[in-house]
Amino acid sequence: MIPTFVRRRTVPLPRVEAQRTANHLLKRVRPPHRLPVAVYAVTQLLLLAWLVAFFPGLRSFDSVNYVWQVTTGNWNSGHSVLYLALVWACLHLTGGLAALVLVQTVAMAAVLAYSAVALRDLGVRGRWSLAAAAGCAALPSTGAFTVFLWKDVPFAICGVLAFAAACRLLAVRLDGGAPSIRNAATRRQLGLLAVGTAGLMLFRNNGMLPAVGACAVLIVVLAGIRRVLLLLTLAAAALTLLLNGVVYPALGVRMVQGAQSESFLYGDIADVYGRRPADFTAADRRLMARVAPLSHWSGRGSDCWDLDRTMADPFDDDAAAANNARLEALWWRTVRKDPVEVVRVRLCRSQIGWGLLPGPARYNGQTQISLPHVKQNLFTMADWNWQGRLPRARTVLMPRPPSATARRLADSFYRSTTGLPSQIVVWRGATWCYLGYAAVAGYARRRRSWTALALAAPIAAAQLTVLAANPGQLARYMVVPLFLGILVAPLAAARPKAARPRAG
């Protein structure tokens, strides 16, 4: 027995002390809020790790194009004008782009935390929703993706937000209730759904298709708020059309959406001509020859895997625009004459949306993954006339990681996932579509409710959009289904009766 006057005070180990501090802080958080707080903390730390490793963020050809547009006054609607405005604001307010990427990580962590709450409403245990959200933040295809300077990042954030809001509304319906506009919680979910829906439409030129498709399913199954859902969807669509049709042109933005959509028609014509040239008349060939040599239409241009090969030189964009009405008429005749061929072309071009394995590399059919590096020629943009703005562009676009070791480790992990077979799980969005459908189907069966199948609507809407019109095999085109597939996977182990009380 040691006398009290000689006892020494026990000093807790740092790990024990940190755990005690964390437990103390967690106890101060209300029980319903502990899950989202924990999910936000974990995912934010993981996303910040990606940002530190690739500071001031990852880049692509599109990233360089954004900077070129906003620093030279060549704004066009080929990319999201709203995202261009964010890039412009960040450059002018901070002199760089790191702040915008940081905001992307904060927003992504927040919507992942919100998704965890939605999964809890559906009966998923907190540990599984935390694991799903952490997986989204840790994987290169979704976590490192968040630190790219890309319009697709806020598009994905809005997709996850809309999905989570829809899940919370559906959870009330599945528990035997009826969402009502008179309920404050329902109004909050509807508000978040509206923000997510509008964001889907504004951050991608084809974002209206998945947004409207998913909302249409919700309108069918959520009888109590059908009119409100319809009005919110129409309002988001009206805002998008107003900005694209009136506001952006008035501000001097060059509108190019029409040219982009017409390129799909040219690709269809080229592929069918390459396979069945006898189906085209002499007048058809003369029309096509005005735009590109027939050898291009039947050769490289007839590659169904990548639309860029059709639109590359010697394809004359100006000649195509001048003869667009006649080319559209030719496309309609081709569809009526060879509908199966046109469908085959679209399925080939959208293989990233439904296939588990990549296509042939010699035709650009492989999974096209943006690697974590910035080329010295800025992805060929440095070879163009930058009107004296190239030095500043290099300053804000080139990587400046604070830790070479962190960058090397992150780069190694990133690249290790791009090959087969890991690519199938990490980068192929179709894989997670099918896993998500299976999880939702099993969940609906356990609940004995057809309504639960509506949980798969956002995934299906995003996938079908890619199947309808897709230019190439870029992995990022399926990033929203990839996020959502990972998030709904825990439904396979959900216990509906174990759903916890909702907080807001």
Image (cartoon, grey):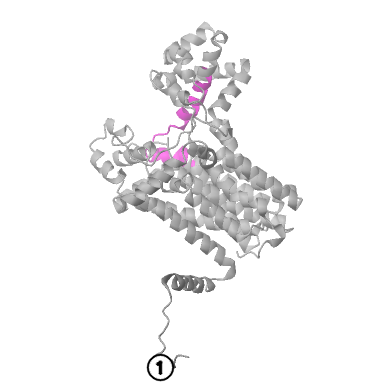
449 shown above or below 17:
above
Question: In the image, residue 207 lies at what x, y percent?
Answer: 53, 40
Image point (54%, 52%), residue name: 161
Where, by quadrant of the figure, is residue 317 drawn? top left
Question: In the image, residue 234 lies at what x, y percent?
Answer: 58, 45
Residue 212 shown left or right of residue 175 in the figure = left
258 drawn magenta: yes
Secondary structure state at the residue bearing disc 1: helix
332 shown above or below 419:
above
In this view of the protein, which residue sits in the foreground, 475 or 333? 475
238 shown above or below 14:
above
In this view of the protein, which residue sits in the foreground, 336 or 430? 430
* Residue 216 visible somewhere in the drawing: no
26 drawn magenta: no
Q: Which residues are magenta?
A: 242-269
Image point (46%, 29%), residue name: 260
The amino acid marked with disc number 1 is Phe
Q: Determine the residue located farthest toward the top in the rendered image.
A: 282
Residue 194 shown left or right of residue 140 in the figure = right
Question: In the image, residue 212 lies at what x, y percent?
Answer: 60, 42
The residue indicated by pointer 1 is 5
Residue 439 shown left or right of residue 134 in the figure = right
Q: Quadrant of the C terminus?
A: bottom right
